[in-house]
Amino acid sequence: MDCIFCKITSGELPATFVAESEHAVAFNDIHPVAPVHVLIVPRVHFTDVAELAVANPEVLADLIQLGVRVAELKSTGSFRLQFNTGAEAGQTVFHAHGHITSRTPRS
Ligand code: AMP
Ligand code: ZN
């Protein structure tokens, strides 16, 4: 399967991880839309968060906990966690992932 996020989570493609957990990794989005924009990506491949939630809620909980940790590391307070689900909603990479964004980076 030709999946860019599988290649990143497995180490086949280089990426600098901001943080990692048992089931997920976090790295900066290549096209940031906010001063803090980090992707949280499960190590297992599911098409989107809806599939992941049904198939593996333990991994989803771990993913969200990683997102909260990233937000605490990278921002001073408020953050957003967004899961684009489906092409019409703007999903372009069909390996489940969340976007952590914040307008208040920690310096
Ligand atoms: P989505 O549109 O929700 O599917 O989000 C996919 C995100 O992945 C976009 O914000 C892209 O900028 C980002 N992206 C795509 N390829 C890479 C990459 N190699 N490294 C980091 N971010 C990427
Ligand atoms: Zn994948």
Image: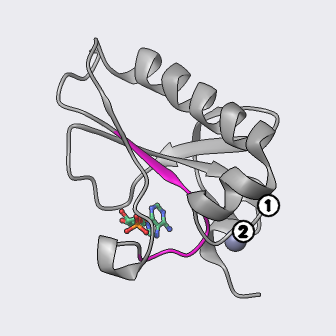
Residue occupied by mark 2: 6
Could you tell me if residue 13 is visible in this image? Answer: no
* Residue 88 falls within the magenta-colored stretch: no
Residue occupied by mark 1: 10
Please name the amino acid that badge 2 sits on: Cys
Q: Is residue 42 above or below residue 7?
A: above
Residue located at (79% from left, 61% from top): 10
Residue 3 horizontal/vertical position (percent): 66, 79
Residue located at (68% from left, 33% from top): 61
Magenta region:
92-100
Marks 1 & 2, CB-CB < 8 Å contact: yes
Mark 2, ligand 2, within 8 Å: the answer is yes
Q: Is residue 40 above or below residue 48?
A: above
For the C terminus, give its image quadrant.
top left
Relative to 95, is 36 on the left or the right?
Answer: left
Relative to 60, is 86 on the left or the right?
Answer: left
Q: Main secondary structure of the magenta part?
A: loop
Residue located at (67% from left, 51% from top): 53
Residue 58 horizontal/vertical position (percent): 79, 37
Relative to 47, is 38 on the left or the right?
Answer: left
Residue located at (77% from left, 87% from top): 1
- Helix, strand or loop under label 1: helix
